[in-house]
Amino acid sequence: MLNWKGKRPFESTQYYPAQLKETYGEEVDDWRNKIYWGDNLQVMSHLLKTYRGKINLIYIDPPFDSKADYKKKIELKGKKVENDRTAFEEKQYTDIWTNDEYIQFMYERLILMKELLADNGSIYVHCDWRMNSYLQLVLDEVFGKSNFLNLVTWRRQIVRGMKTHAQFMPFSSDYIYLYTKNKDNAIWNKIEKINAISLEEAERKYKKDDKDFFATSDPGTYSDESIIKLYEEGRIYVTRGGKLLIKDGKVSVTVGKIRIKYHRETVGDKVLEKTVVDNIWDDIPGLGVNPNEYLDYPTQKPEALLERIIKASSNPGALVFDCFMGSGTTQAVAMKLGRRFIGADINLGAMEITSKRLKHLSTEILEDNTYRLSSEGGATSCLYRL
């Protein structure tokens, strides 16, 4: 068990009422997506009454203890103001922390998140090098070590400019912890990366049979029985022009070595290279590479990152929660993917950006039949204030 200065048990909370401030669109199958403006501890205390054990996926991008204040110019109801993450609760939402108050802050909130998670639910906690080791210990305490699933390393940038002159090695990665409420029941959809290459490149890179282009690998510990089955499926290749021999359930070759074929899929004039994604994510660039997504929010994350997370750990119609909402990327991607969502943030700037973003996206979705709607999510939302 992790101990820190000022550690306090968090065993109960109270219900906080919420006031409906604004709605957009009509309910879909008795559901309307929700965003809350207020302290997320109070928001989650409010949600427990209705959503305890009902949220399928949580993603949070909390403060990193970066020793910085995040500010931006925003326009609210025609007035320009200087806003930052300390607009309403300076001590909590400035990213400057003293003693171990950061750990206590996260500890209390993670306890409530666990209560909100469904039995098949998972939580992704985004952090960097500053507090990741402490966060893992807190997550172990709250969710249990046995419910740790993985630690993702995300390359958020390629080193360039002044960072190439860093005294030691420049920091280019963030970390995302993945825990679940119950490891035996956790939703998991295999993630694949797809790289499309030309037919000309495929001709140079791969062999080809009557099915398609293919790569090969050593059979390793495959049994003779497994190799015979693969042979019947047309997935055995023998090097040096050799042939596979099968006798009395045993395999041998006339010459060469046995290899397993892995066929590539050809679509039009492209050949698709599919690989299973592991816990090193170096194929999703930060917003410096995709400036069209940038909404002038300092800690904004790319939509592709949230798309991977949401697809991996939820299914259409699932309920997704992000209580450090920021620019609303989690909510926007959830809406696009046909998931329901609840979001929360204490920052006025975050509420303004997210509300505007979701209204614009809702209009797009309602005008575009390519998006999934009906009971699997919907393009409506409402704003509450605590």
Image (spheres, helix red, strand yellow):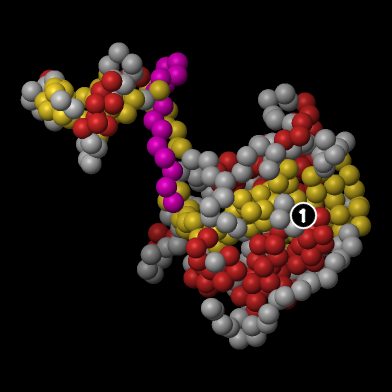
Residue at numbered disc 1: 51
- Position of residue 119 measured from the top left corner of the image (x, y, whole percent): 64, 54
Q: Residue at x 64, y 46 (%)?
A: 294
Q: Toward which corner of the image does residue 68 lie, by quadrant?
A: bottom right
Between 281 and 143, the one lying in front of the other is 143
- In the rendered image, residue 230 lying in the magenta stretch gets the answer no
Q: Label 1's element?
A: helix
Tell me which residue sits at (72%, 52%) in the image.
54
Where does the magenta region start and end?
A: 266-279
Residue toward you, 350 or 138: 138
**Is residue 90 visible to us here?**
yes
Where is residue 272? Give x, y as percent.
41, 27
Q: Is residue 271 magenta?
A: yes
* Amino acid beneath label 1: Tyr
Identify which residue, 76 or 359, lies in the foreground.
359
Q: What is the x, y in percent for residue 316? A: 66, 37
Residue in view at x 76 percent, y 42 percent: 358
